[in-house]
Image (cartoon, helix red, strand yellow):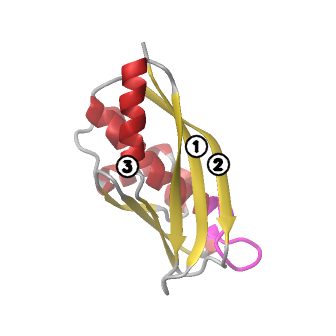
Amino acid sequence: MYFRDMMKLTPKKINIFLFFKLPAAYFCGVRLKCIEAYECTTTVKHRWINQNPFGSMYFAVQAMAAELTTGALVLSHIKESGKNISMLVSNQKGTYSKKALGKITFSCADGKKVLHALEESIRSGEGITFWMTSVGIDEVGDEVSRMEFEWRIKVKS
């Protein structure tokens, strides 16, 4: 099954993609829960396999879950455009404000940024970079981390 050949992207299809193409994320428990036009949500639960030596979730696991919220939105809008467009994370920043314990939900609501960047890239034929933010919230509603990803998209010729 080739990812770009699938019809509409759904959480189930993206989670299958994780299993085959990003097994580290899959086996650490990262799961896409919801993808809509402007927002995407993932979850990951603190477990033995994704812990750090300090008893909380390893930062890289949080980054995988956060990046998926942004990347799924980019991929979804690229797919809907029908154009052959490359996508790449060119920069990342993360802030960790609390130990990540229990189930952490990451959300990104930057779908409109993706649409604007795609429109600009398609119109100009140039590569476009833009930042997207994903916020991780624990089960009691406290922010545990905030990740920013700089995406670069470009129409392939």
Relative horizontal placement of residue 87, taking residue 62 as reference (left or right): left
User: In front: 67, or 53?
Assistant: 67
**x then y, percent, for residue 81:** 28, 31
Residue 78, picture quadrant:
top left
The residue lying at 29 percent from left, 55 percent from top is 36
Quadrant housing the N terminus: top left
Q: Do we see residue 53 in this rendering?
A: yes
Indicate whether 157 appears above or below 115: above
Mark identifier at residue 111: 3
Gap between marks 1 and 2, in whole Å? 6 Å
**x then y, percent, for residue 101:** 59, 80
Tell me whether the residue at label 1 lies in contact with that at label 2, contact meaning CB atoms closer than 8 angstroms. yes
The magenta-colored residue range is 49-61
Type of amino acid at the residue the image marks with label 2? Gln
Type of amino acid at the residue the image marks with label 1? Glu
Element type where label 2 sits in the image: strand
Q: Which of pointers 1 and 2 lies earlier in the amino acid sequence?
A: 2
Type of amino acid at the residue the image marks with label 3? Gly
**x then y, percent, for residue 148:** 59, 53
Mark identifier at residue 150: 1
Circle 2 residue: 92
Report crowding for label 2: few under 14, some 14 to 19, many 20 or more residues within 10 A (C-alpha).
some
Report crowding for label 1: few under 14, some 14 to 19, many 20 or more residues within 10 A (C-alpha).
some
Element type where label 3 sits in the image: helix
**x then y, percent, for residue 155:** 42, 21
Gap between marks 2 and 3, in whole Å? 18 Å
Indicate whether 83 appears above or below 42: above
Q: Which of pointers 2 and 3 lies earlier in the amino acid sequence?
A: 2
Element type where label 1 sits in the image: strand
Residue 96, picture quadrant:
bottom right
